[in-house]
């Protein structure tokens, strides 16, 4: 089975602090990590390879330093990695990102299953997976919580909805996004880490990928951020006082008022 | 780049440097330099006292031929979801500001009380009723909604950011090559341009972004349940239900739903709950979720969890609230034995009322709590449950 996992390098948000005086984001020393939901996607890809044979290729659209994330993915079990990187990609919204990824995957060809994480920590939209499915014209299921079986070129999956679970069967090649429930990702192996150090990670440019610059980056993004601001924390905070009984009583009253 | 510094006006004062949320500005030789990666948010331009920062304006394609606000009214099992009415209420306000009409689109089979969409503010309901649409087969839904948009050309489309909404609406936006903004917490009309202003949290809620879709139509947004409140229905309101045909032979359905298993274990579902009681590491073990459940029962609430209990296996992942779990926006969120990590708060900080119960007075959760009790949750929760049950009489 030829599996492609698309990941994103994101800032580790534990580090995102607001500078108390200037009210701006503190960016120094913010480490970059593989988007957590993507680690579940990668793990699932590796498990499928262990079960059915084949290979796992991990890709990302990003600046040159995204190479680190790809190498980390190799240490976690991916066989190969490709970095889609070009200045023309910078500032892409989800439509433009899905477009660029689709060009990369089309150039790659020959895949059976494309796996992404449910959403990213920074953008948090969850839109690239479905967008990519449309660009590649692949059948798609979101929020997969379990892969049951692959047989006769069809994959059976379970996915999470608010009210419970649905089981789907789709024809390969296909694309899915996965949720955390699907597995517990492994830690890097020693062999994986060594492989990651020496791996060749090719970088594909816009031209090599046949990317139309009008459809990528800021130029290709239908949405645009027009304003950024820091939310005022206007919440009135009341620490209840008195004996525990009095505090609980006060809380019950306040809840009674609200509900 | 679409942004540049006018070297003649820039004095190198550096006011812009600290304001860039992405840290992309440096002053070199008394001139501000903007590095690559700028996404034109304009924060720097706003603070420049010398008008030295120039951002190219995007040519605005006229919204010619596009008019109207649409709401995708989601239903399951023939019943319209609450978020559909919340969005019709909000959509009505937007339509009024634009002086245009509001329509709801409903796809399904034997959907009940569709006229209520009119009562809540829609002027029209486009209703496609077909047995093939009963199971919300997303290939059908995507194709049908795209066809409707192409035929009727709304300028704005809103949809709930539910599992279904987040899965097929992006496909619709992709085919239409238009902009979609996910999980909006604020919607408004820009008085100058009449464009939709879409505000949403990023970076776990620490930074808010306002987004516009200037050159493409429809401008699409998804909104989480309970972010907007539904209004009061007016049964005297007039409107039209327009029947839409669906020809399933024209669409290839490539995913087949084999089975739907309803999660009956929870009386109140987390995603729709008005009140949520959540437990954290402070509970100490799986059995102690019992006192959380008792309080939840007394309040008619759903049970939630922070990440550690889920990782420990004390409670299933479907209860997890936070960055890698669910984002919720209930009226009341009660956090018990939860310290309040940034990741957990990202999943619940927009709740109307937050109650925190924790032994540690320095727990970060108290910073966002409306009401806080520093105390032993094993005493507080049973006491609170008893009080609430007694006051029922």
Image (cartoon, coloured by chain):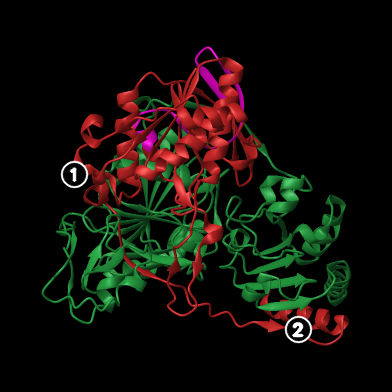
Residue B280, horizontal then vertical, whole percent: 75, 59
- In the rendered image, which residue does mark 1 sit on? A214
The image quadrant that residue A246 belongs to is bottom right
The chain assigned the colour red in the figure is A
Magenta: main secondary structure equals: strand
**Disc 1 packing (10 Å; few <14; some 14–19; many ≥20):** few
- Crowding at mark 2 (Cα within 10 Å: few <14, some 14-19, many 20+): some
- What is the spatial separation of the Cα atoms under label 1 and label 2, in whole angstroms? 57 Å
Total marks shown come to 2
Residue at image coords 22%, 82%: B49
Which structural element holds mark 1?
A: helix
Q: Which residues are magenta?
A: A132-156
Q: Quadrant of the N terminus of chain B?
A: bottom left
Label 2, secondary structure: give it: loop
Check residue B224 for magenta coloring: no
Say which of A188 and B213 sits in front: A188
Q: Colour of chain B?
A: green
Q: Which residue is mark 2?
A: A240
């Amino acid at each position: 089975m030829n599996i492609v996992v698309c990941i994103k390098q994101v800032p580790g948000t534990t580090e995102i602090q607001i500078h108390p005086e200037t009210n701006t984001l503190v960016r120094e020393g913010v480490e970059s990590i593989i988007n957590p939901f993507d680690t579940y996607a990668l793990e699932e890809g590796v498990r499928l390879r262990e079960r059915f044979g084949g290979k796992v290729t991990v890709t990302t659209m990003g600046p040159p330093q995204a190479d680190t994330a790809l190498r980390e993915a190799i240490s976690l079990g991916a066989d190969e990695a490709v970095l889609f990187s070009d200045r023309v990609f910078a500032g892409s919204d989800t439509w433009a990102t899905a477009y660029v990824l689709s060009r990369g995957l089309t150039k790659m060809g020959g895949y059976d299953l494309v796996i992404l994480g449910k959403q990213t920590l920074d953008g948090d939209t969850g839109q690239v997976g479905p967008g990519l499915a449309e660009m590649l014209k692949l059948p798609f299921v979101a929020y997969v919580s379990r892969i049951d079986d692959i047989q006769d070129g069809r994959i059976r999956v379970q996915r999470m909805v608010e009210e419970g679970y649905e089981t789907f069967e789709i024809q390969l090649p296909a694309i899915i996004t996965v949720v955390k429930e699907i597995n517990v990702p492994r830690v890097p192996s020693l062999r994986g880490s060594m492989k990651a150090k020496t791996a060749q990670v090719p970088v594909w440019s816009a031209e090599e990928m046949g990317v139309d610059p009008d459809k990528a980056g800021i130029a290709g993004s239908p949405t645009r951020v027009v304003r950024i601001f820091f939310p005022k924390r206007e919440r009135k905070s009341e620490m209840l006082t008195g004996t525990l009984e009095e505090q609980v009583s006060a809380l019950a009253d306040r809840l009674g008022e609200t509900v | 780049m679409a942004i540049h510094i006018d070297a003649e006006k820039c004095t190198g004062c550096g006011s812009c440097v600290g304001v860039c949320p992405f840290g992309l500005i440096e002053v070199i030789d008394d001139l501000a330099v903007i590095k690559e990666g700028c996404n034109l948010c304009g924060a720097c331009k706003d603070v420049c006292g010398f008008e030295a920062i120039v951002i190219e304006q995007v040519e605005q394609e006229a919204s010619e031929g596009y008019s109207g606000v649409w709401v995708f009214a989601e239903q399951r099992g023939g019943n319209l979801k609450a978020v559909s009415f919340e969005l019709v209420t909000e959509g009505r306000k937007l339509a009024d500001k634009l002086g245009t009409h509001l329509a709801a689109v409903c796809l399904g089979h034997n959907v009940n009380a569709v006229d209520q969409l009119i009562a809540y503010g829609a002027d029209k309901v486009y209703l496609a009723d077909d047995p093939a649409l009963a199971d919300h087969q997303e290939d059908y839904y995507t194709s049908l909604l795209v066809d409707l948009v192409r035929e009727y050309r709304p300028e704005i489309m809103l949809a709930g950011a539910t599992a279904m909404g987040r899965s097929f609406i992006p496909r619709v936006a992709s085919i239409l090559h238009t902009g979609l903004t996910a999980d909006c917490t604020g919607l408004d009309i820009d008085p100058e341009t009449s464009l939709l202003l879409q505000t949403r949290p990023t970076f776990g809620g620490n930074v808010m972004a306002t987004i516009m879709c200037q050159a493409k139509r429809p401008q699409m947004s998804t909104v989480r349940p309970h972010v907007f409140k539904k209004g009061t229905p007016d049964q005297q309101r007039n409107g039209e239900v327009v029947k839409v045909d669906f020809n399933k032979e024209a669409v290839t359905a490539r995913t087949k739903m084999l089975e739907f298993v309803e999660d009956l274990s929870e009386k109140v579902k987390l995603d729709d709950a008005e009140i949520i009681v959540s437990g954290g590491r402070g509970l100490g073990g799986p059995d102690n979720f019992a006192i959380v459940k008792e309080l939840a029962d007394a309040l008619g609430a759903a049970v939630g969890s922070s990440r550690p209990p889920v990782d420990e296996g004390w409670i299933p992942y479907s209860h997890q609230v936070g960055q890698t779990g669910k984002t919720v926006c209930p009226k009341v969120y009660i956090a018990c034995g939860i310290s309040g990590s940034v990741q957990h708060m990202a999943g619940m900080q927009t709740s109307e009322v937050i109650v925190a119960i924790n032994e540690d007075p320095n727990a970060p959760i108290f910073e966002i709590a409306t009401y806080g009790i520093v105390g032993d949750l094993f005493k507080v929760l049973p006491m609170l449950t008893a009080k609430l049950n007694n006051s029922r009489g």
